[in-house]
Amino acid sequence: MASTVEPDYKSSSTPIPAPAPATAVVDYFKFDVILRFLLFASSLVSVVVMVTSNQTIYVPAPLSAKFRYSPAFVYFVAAFSVSGLYSIITTLASLSAIKNPTLRNKLLLHYVLWDALILGIIASAVGTAGGIAYLGLKGNRHVVGWNKICNVFDDFCRHVGSAIAVGLFGSIVTLLLIGLSAYSIHSRLPK
Amino acid sequence: MASTVEPDYKSSSTPIPAPAPATAVVDYFKFDVILRFLLFASSLVSVVVMVTSNQTIYVPAPLSAKFRYSPAFVYFVAAFSVSGLYSIITTLASLSAIKNPTLRNKLLLHYVLWDALILGIIASAVGTAGGIAYLGLKGNRHVVGWNKICNVFDDFCRHVGSAIAVGLFGSIVTLLLIGLSAYSIHSRLPK
């Protein structure tokens, strides 16, 4: 009862001989791995969707929209590339912590610190790209010339909007990861 | 040695009779109060500087720039108003935890969860406002009409840039708060 919640779920090894003898600690690392995989998937999808957002229109000369024309979208791709790499590394770390429970306390502390940094990076990237995308969608009638462009570059804006939505999902997953790590550390405190 | 780090610093009461007898726990709540006050100050400054960013030029007709003309800057003000209120409430909670150490474990868990949410909100607000401000500063030569405006509205852009810089400082303070709370929980774990 103390070691694992569901013994037949992803364990695929011999039953662990009760590695945490101090208190009844719930094993949160399986949820951690699942959430980190979700962060990886959303980072990958948002980067791919953003990078492939390429549209050329002919009115009357060819006019292209590419993600790399906007510094905001370049920052978005950079931030989610970092979070994707980070999620791969931390997924491996969590998998090793499932096998080796002595690492867990130290790992959970580092998870909270680094997950918070990643949250700050990707939340600001979602904000930056979202602000520019909103300007492209609605324009700003108070500024001369800042007109909307999504009525022309419809396919480009759909790509950008999808990438931002998936990025927002990734930010929420990171928030859940921080909460899970904090809750996991808290559950190990002496009652 | 166990109860307080510097007994003459901000304590201003009778010496606390060793409230945490379990392990040698360092008292991080004074740093917590200082950081939360810094978060409050930076939230207040960034909101005030952003709200007062008002400039009218006459070329030849009067033309105004106000923060509320841009949804990005409105979101920025809303986000930092929330973080300012949050920092007041949590400063009071930390002050009560200095007096009453039995609350601390539960409070630290809630701090990590809610600080991470606030970090997500204000980091995305800094990103959103920063993206629009960068467009105003540099323009985007790939989009017809998205010209820079900071050569005309120089005073407005100085206000906006200062508000964003102070907001970025507030985000870093929130990151430090999460790290401090996580480290504080971790230090209470049984060795």
Image (cartoon, coloured by chain):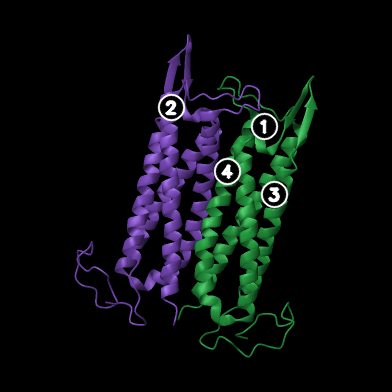
Chain colours: A green, B purple
Q: Chain of mark 3?
A: A
Dot 3 alpha-carbon crowd within 10 angstroms: few under 14, some 14 to 19, many 20 or more: many
Q: Which residue is mark 2?
A: B156
Say which element carries label 4. helix
Q: Which chain is disc 1 placed on?
A: A
Side (left or right) of A11 relative to B49: right
Query: Rounded to the nearest whole Å, what is the CA distance between mark 1 and mark 2?
Result: 24 Å
The label number, if any, that marks residue A94 in the structure image: none
Residue at the spot of label 1: A137
Identify the element where label 3 is drawn. Answer: helix
Q: Name the mark nearer the viewer: 4 or 3.
A: 3
What kind of residue is marked 4?
Gly
Observer-side mark, 1 or 3, equals 3
Which numbered marker is on residue A127? Answer: 4
Residue type at tag 3: Ser
| Residue B18 shown left or right of residue A92 in the figure | left
Q: Which type of secondary structure does the marked residue at label 2 adopt?
A: helix
Residue B168: where, in percent of width, then height?
Answer: 45, 45
- On the same chain, marks 4 and 3? The answer is yes
